[in-house]
Image: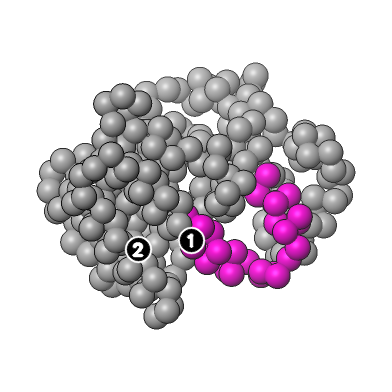
Amino acid sequence: MKLQYQSLKDESQLIFTNFNCGPSQELLKSKELYKILWCKEAGVTINIDGYDVVLKINQVVFCTPLNVVSLSQQEGLLAIVFNREFYCIQNHDTEVSCNGFLFFGSSQPPIITLCEKDQKGFESMFYLFQEEFETKDNIQEEMLRVMLKGLLITSSRLIKKTLPNPKMPKTQLDLIRKYHVLVEQHFKEKHKVVDYADLLFKSPKTLSNLFKKIGNKSPLKIINERIVLEAKRLLLFSDKSAEEIGYDLGYTEAAHFSKFFKRQVGTPPGTFKKNYKKSPL
């Protein structure tokens, strides 16, 4: 099954699929698509950025266009896939509050587990998606966009419930989201917490205390993990040398990048790449 809306005018597209056909599997290779994958059967394995992730039944994972995704099996998944032209996460962030939580909120794609009530809600939304794809008229695009917005709002609410302190004031939650988004935008040239504190008009101590309050990773760890993730992606999925990758990530000296990578990962960049090729993680 592959149900698709596509506009030739603005190149926007939204796809609903279960990956049981070749063309839908090719979607995962695109570097332009956001991907929401819902596991309908237990033990479905997907590979994200070189790492196998086993999804349990009724778990949903949210991947950005940057995530490199592949499937070891096609059965048991439902997916909503869309590009920036159809729905811009950044531009609509004030409406859905998903940027920084569902997308670009972690060095690893977030996963939510649906309880029985949430499962019924998702079943209803996905059923309505399928129904709407079969309705061809001049308001179909807007209807699909509104439905996607509803799915993102529901998912954002669920992901917030997984926080150690889900009742945190909205102003503090917004600050955490903004920090994640800024790290995504600037991690290649800004490697210190103070850089982001300045952009947020806060002190580094304020940020550290805030992240400590919710039991989350420290602000510095979030920066470091994002740099490491990009380094791993480039090492595994590009032909660039470790020196070139280090330069791309803001390190003027190859030795500084190698030292940073080894401190974070446990092995130098070259060794990491060789070990992965011998035995994929």
The percent position of residue 147, horizontal first and vertical second, equals: 39, 54
Q: Which amino acid is tagged 2?
A: Met
Residue 115 position within the rendered picture, expressed as x and y whole percent measured from the top left: 43, 78
Residue 267 horizontal/vertical position (percent)? 52, 42
In the picture, residue 185 is in which quadrant?
top right
Along the polypeptide, which appears first: circle 2 or circle 1? Answer: 2
Report if residue 256 is visible in the image: no
Answer whether residue 161 is magenta in the image: yes
Between 72 and 152, the one nearer to me in the picture: 152
Residue 155: image tag: 1
The residue indicated by pointer 2 is: 125
For the residue pair 280 and 94, the one nearer the viewer reads as 94
Q: Is residue 200 above or below residue 240?
A: below
Position of 19 compared to 29: left or right? left
Q: State the residue at coordinates (22%, 64%).
A: 76
Residue name at image x 84 percent, y 38 percent: 201
The quarter holding residue 160 reads: bottom right
Residue reaching furthest to the front: 138
* Nearer the camera: disc 2 or disc 1: 2
In the image, the segment drawn in magenta is: 152-178
Seen at 28% across and 31% down, the residue is 7
Q: Is residue 142 left or right of residue 229?
A: left
The one of 27 and 232 positioned closer to us in this rendering: 27
